[in-house]
Image: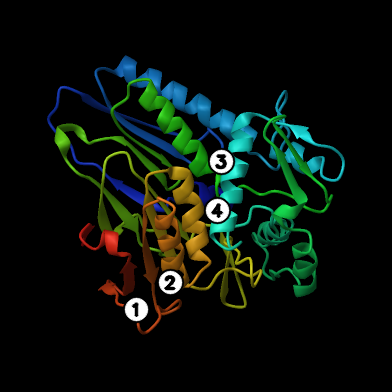
Amino acid sequence: MKKLKLLFTSALLLIVSACSTSLEKYSMTATDTGFDTIVSFVAYTKNEAQFEEYSSFLKKEFKRYDALFDKYDTHKGINNIKTINDNAGIKPVKVDKEIIELLEQCQTYNTLSNHQFDITMGSVLELWHETREAANNNPNPTIPSTSSLEEAKKHTGWQHVTINKEDSTVYIDDKAVSLDVGASAKGFAVEKIAQKLEDKGLEHAIINAGGNVRMIGSKPEEETWQVGIQIPNLESFSTDSLLSIKIDDSMSIVTSGDYQRYYMYNDQLMHHIIDPITLMPARYARAVTVITKDSGIADMLSTTLFTMSYQDGITLLNTLKEQGIQADALWVYDKTQPKDENVEAMSITGYDVVVSDGLKDRIVK
C-alpha cells in the first residue's frame, strides 16, 4: 500500500452540523505538520483572524512534537527518540520534559496492560516496517522470519530503559533495544495541543489528526458532538459511517484498525498493529475505537485493545476504572474476524458491533 494513500485514510469521519450562533465556524486542513498524517481543525471563533491565530499555533506545535517523537530522522538542536535509540548502550541522553512525560505514561500503561502495550518493541516493529515498505509494488512480498522476530524480541523490555526525571535523561542499556512511540505519540501531542488551545481561550473546536480526535469544549448552542465510525473497507477506503456515537464535551476518540497500513501475503492481510505475544499482526477484530478524556490514553488503549480478545479488553477497562480512568470501547467484527459466539452484538450492514456498557445509550445508527 503506497504511503500517499495512507495519508488520506482517516479512522474517523467527523459529523459536525451547522448551527446558528454569534460565533463563526472556520476550518483548515494541513498535510505538512508531521506524524505522516493529515490534521484537520474545526473551530468556532469570533472572527477569521482569531481562528488563524489558533490554527497557526496548532500547526507549529504539531511540527514540534513530530520532531521530538521522531524515530527515523535527526532534527537540528533536538534530542529526540532517534537520539535516544542511537545512543543505546552508549550513554544517557538529555531530552525535553515532554519526552520524559510520554515515556513515563507509556511505562505506566505497559504495567496496567500486563505488558500488552510495549513501546520497547522497536526492534520487532522495525522488521515489520521494513518488510511492509518492501512489499510496495512487489509481486512477491514476504514476511519476517520467525527466527528473526524471536531474536528481535530478546531485545525488548523496560528493564533496559532508565528514565532519570531529575536529570531529564533517558538511557537504554542494550544497543539492540529501541523505542517506538508510534502507538502513543500522536495522541499525546493532540492532547497537549488541545490543552494549550483551551488555555488560550478556545472554547468550541475539534482537532482530528488522522483519526485521533479531540473535542475542545462543547458544541455551540449546547448541541451534542457526534462522531461517525468509519466502515473498515479495504477496497474503497470508504468515508461512509458505520454508525455514530454521541460524545461528551472535551472528550477524545481514537480508532485502531487493520485497514490503514497493510499489504497482502498469501491472501492474508498483514497490517501494522503487531501482537506482542505472537509477534504477528493481531487477529481479534477489524477495528477498535476508544472514547475517554485524554487523547494520549485513548491512543494507547485503542492499540492495546486491538491486540487483545474482547474479554481481556473488558478486564483492562475495568482495571483502568479501578485506577480512576473511565474509558469505553467499541469493537467491529466481520466474517474474516468474527466475534466470540457468546458476545452480544449489533448487526450493521454486514458487521458485528460490540460496545462496552458506557456506550450502549450513545449509539446512533
Label 1 crowd (10 A; few <14 / some 14-19 / many >=20)? few
Task: Give residue 295's position: percent from left, percent from top.
Answer: 44, 44
Label 2 or label 3, whichever lies nearer to me, is 2
Marks 2 and 4, Cα distance to the nearest angstrom?
Answer: 18 Å
Task: Give residue 172's position: percent from left, percent from top.
Answer: 78, 46
Label 2 or label 4, whichever lies nearer to me, is 4
Left or right placement of residue 24 versus residue 260 in this view: left
| Among numbered discs 2 and 3, the one appearing first in the sequence | 3
Marks 3 and 4, Cα distance to the nearest angstrom?
Answer: 22 Å
Label 3 or label 4, whichever lies nearer to me, is 4
Tag 2 residue: 310
For the residue labelled by badge 4, is the local secondary structure a helix, a strand or a loop? helix
Q: Which of 105 and 61 is in front in this view?
A: 105
Tag 3 residue: 35
At x 27%, y 40%, the residue is 249
For the residue labelled by badge 3, is the local secondary structure a helix, a strand or a loop? loop
Q: Are marks 1 and 4 in contact (CB under 8 Å)?
A: no
At x 41%, y 30%, the residue is 195
Q: Which mark is residue 343?
A: 1
Q: Quadrant of the C terminus?
A: bottom left
| Among numbered discs 2 and 4, the one appearing first in the sequence | 4
| Among numbered discs 1 and 2, the one appearing first in the sequence | 2
